[in-house]
Amino acid sequence: MPVKRAREPEQQLVKAIYPGTFDPVTKGHVDIVERAARMFDEVIVAVVRNTPKRVMFSDAERVEMFEEALKHVPNATVTGYEGLTVNFAKEHGAGVIVRGLRIGSDFEYERELALMNRDIGDVETACLLSSLEYQYVSSSRVKEIAALGADVSRLVPENVLAPLLHRLEGAGSQ
């Protein structure tokens, strides 16, 4: 556990945002927030509303699922947002964007995004390596293997499993 230093009175709180689609939230996402919450004073999970991705859950459902999964993290909040991530960060006084890196190909994408965000928004990016047990976990893969009947209970928070399976049942009956 990192040692907390006494904060000087003039020091500002360090806020970070963790943006993403989170469709659905996975234990890997929760792990990134838990670790970021130990590094920053406040972490705002920013659930993207205007995503070009085809999502399974509505904006409100994704926010609600992540809120429930993070009840144990007192300095983390969850909200939806639209538009540029750097604008959202500035509006909320966050100087850092947190990103999770799972595999090597993530690095190239995130490096490019980080450089662009710093250029257009003067916001830094902190990349956290996924914990070993979540390196292969993605929302897309979770939905895919759950749809094929695999047990994904070890990959998603408890509150996400039933809605995910229910949604997949409904999709299969159409």
Image (cartoon, helix red, strand yellow):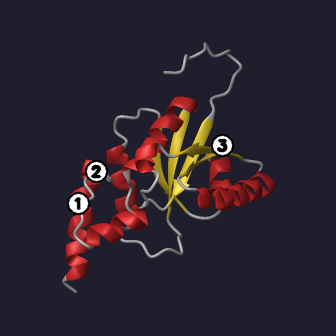
In the rendered structure, find residue 67 and report the number of the disc placed on it. none
Q: Residues within 10 Å of mark 3 (few under 14, many from 20)?
A: many
In this rendering, position of residue 34 left or right of residue 128: left
**Which amino acid type corresponds to the residue marked 3 in the rendered image?**
Val
In the rendered view of the protein, which quadrant contains the C terminus?
bottom left
Q: Is residue 91 positioned above or below 7 on the image?
A: below
Look at the numbered disc 3 and give the secondary structure of its residue.
strand
Residue at (48% x, 62% y) in the render: 21
Callout 2: few (<14), some (14-19), or many (20+) C-alpha neighbours within 10 Å?
few
Q: Earlier in the sequence, mark 1 or mark 3?
A: 3
Q: Position of residue 118 (x, y in %)?
A: 77, 52
Q: Which of 136 and 50 is in front in this view?
A: 136
**Residue shown at 81%/55% (left/top)?**
119
**x, y (%) of residue 92?**
61, 45
Mark 1 touches mark 2? (CB < 8 Å): yes
Q: Is mark 2 on a helix, strand or loop?
A: loop
Residue under the point 60% across and 41% down: 16
In the picture of the structure, the residue carrying the numbered disc 2 is: 154
Q: What residue type is labelled 1?
A: Asp
Q: Which of marks 2 and 3 is nearer the N terminus?
A: 3
Q: Circle 3 is placed at which residue position?
A: 96
User: Is 147 placed left or right of 127 in the picture?
Assistant: left
Disc 2 from disc 3: Cα separation: 30 Å
Residue 151: assigned label = 1
In space, the residues marked 1 and 3 are separated at their CA atoms by: 35 Å
